[in-house]
Amino acid sequence: MAFEIEISTAGKTAKITAEKGEKLIDILSRNGFSVPAACGGRGVCGKCAVRLLEGGFDGVTPDGDGLIKSCRATVRENARAEIKNENGEGLTLIETENLPEGRFAAAVDIGTTTLAAAVLTENGDVKKRSRLNPQSSYGADVISRITACENGGLADLQSLVSKAVGEMLTELSEGRKFECVTVCGNAVMLHIFAGISPVSMGSAPFETKIDGALELDGEKYGINTKKLILLPGVSAFVGSDTVAGIYAVGLYKSQGNILFIDMGTNAETVLKTENGIICSSAAAGPALEGAGTECGTGGVNGAVCRVEKRAGGFEISTIGDEKADGICLSGLLDAVALMLENGVVDSSGFMKNDRFYLTDGVYVSAGDIRQFQLTKSALVSCSQCLLEQAEKTAADLDEIILSGGAGFYLNPASALKTGLLPDVDTGVIRSCGNTALEGALRCAASQNALEEVKKIAHLCKTVDLAGSASFAGKFIENMAFGNN
C-alpha cells in the first residue's frame, strides 16, 4: 500500500510516494536529501532526526520538540515532516529551475566495482539505480583495467560501460529526453567511458588526458541528451567522484579539521584544514563494496548488515529483513569486530578455523580476514599520511565524513575496533551515502553547482603516495589489528 510523505526543508516542499514499512531515512536518501546517520542507523546518535508535523510513523514516538529519528521510523500512513540538521539549519533540495517542462537531468557515478545512476525530474523527484560494473570481468581494480586497455581492450571496456549506463538511464527516464547528464568517477573509469586510453596513468608520471570538465555529445554514447558532461577531477589519483562529494557535503566551506573518505575500491581521501584541502588515494580493493570476499555482496536486500553480540552468541540483521544470502561491509565490520573480541581472530589476523559462520550459508573465511586486512590497512594508512602531511593527528579531527553506499550503515564502533579508520571518538564519524552521485546530480540541474565543482577541483592539492616510504611503513604496521 502506498502513502504520501510530504517533506519540507529550506522553504521548499517535496511530496514523495512511499510504501508501508519503508524506513523514512531510506526514503529521504533516495529522493536527494542528505540526512546524517553517524551511528549507522542504530538509533543512537539522533542526528537523523526530523520534526513530525502531521501523521505518524511506526517504531518512533515524537519527543517534546516533535522530533523523531528517521532511521527508526517506518511508514504507516500519510505524513508531513520537516528536515533540520543538528545545527538547526534547513537542508536544501536540489535546484530544478534549469529544467524545462518534460525534461530530466541525470547523473552517473562510474565506480570500479559499482555503477550508480540518478534521475531528477522538473518536479524535484529523484529515482536511482545501481548495478555491478560489467568491466569486472577484466579485473577488480583500475590497474587490471589499464592493463586490459594496453592490450587492446579499450573499445570492449568502453562498450560495456556505456551500454550499462545507457540501460540504467533509459529505465529511469522511461525513454524521455535529458536536458543534461553529468558523469563522475575515478580518472581511469572516466577515460574508459569517454573512449580515451588510460594507459598514461598506469606508470610514472601518472598523467591524465582529460583536463577539467569535458562536454560530449551524449547521443554518440547511447544517452538521450546532447549535453553530456564529465565532471573535473583533481589528478590521476583523485577523481571527479571525490570532487562532486566534496561539493555535496559542503566540505570546501567547512571550518575545522575534517577528513572525507570515499569508501570504495580506490579509497580516495581528502583532508580539509585551515591551510587548504589535500587529497590522495590508495588501492583498498573491492572488499569495501562487497567483492573480493567469499560471501560478500553490496547493500542489497538479504545482505547481512548488522552482527550484534547477545548472551550465548550473536544476532544478525539483514537489509529488508530478508533471508541472509551474503554479507555487506557493515555486516563484515561487525563480524570481524566480534571475532576479535571473542578470540576467533588474533591481532595478527590468524583465524583458528577456516570459517566463522553467521548462518548456515553465510560466513567469514580466513581468506576474507586477510583481504580485509589489506583493505583496511590501505585506507587508514592513506588517512594517516594526509594527517602527517598537514602536521595533524587523529586527535585534531573535528569530523570524519564517510562517502559511498558501502559505509552508509557502518557501525562506527566496529570500524574503529577493526582499525578501518583513524582512532577517534565515535561521535566524530558521519556517514553520508553516495555523495558523489548527489553532487553530480546537482551539477546536472544547476549551472551554479557545476561552476562550484570546477573551482573545487582547482582548490585541491594531491599528495602522491606512490613510492612513499611513509605510506609503505604505515601499511605494514596497520596490517595488524589494533595498531591504528
Image (spheres, rainbow, N blue to C red):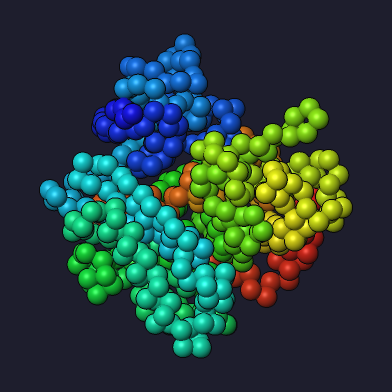
Q: Is residue 443 left or right of residue 478?
A: left
Res. 17 image quadrant: top left
Residue at the spot x=69%, y=43% of the render?
359
Indicate the quadrant containing the N terminus: top left, top right, bottom left or bottom right.
top left
Which one is nearer the viewer's eye here, 411 or 468? 411
Q: Residue 253 location in percent, x, y?
A: 43, 46
Q: Residue 412 location in percent, x, y?
A: 64, 40
Q: Residue 20 location in percent, x, y?
A: 39, 28
State whether residue 226 is above or below residue 62: below
Q: Is residue 434 left or right of residue 226?
A: right
Residue at the spot x=33%, y=17% of the render?
54
Q: Residue furthest left?
A: 101
Q: Residue furthest bottom?
A: 151
Observer able to see residue 268: yes
Res. 473 image quadrant: bottom right
Q: Residue furthest top?
A: 64
Q: Residue 260 location in percent, x, y?
A: 54, 51
Residue at the spot x=81%, y=30% of the render?
312
Q: How many marks?
A: 0
Which one is nearer the viewer's eye here, 136 or 86? 136
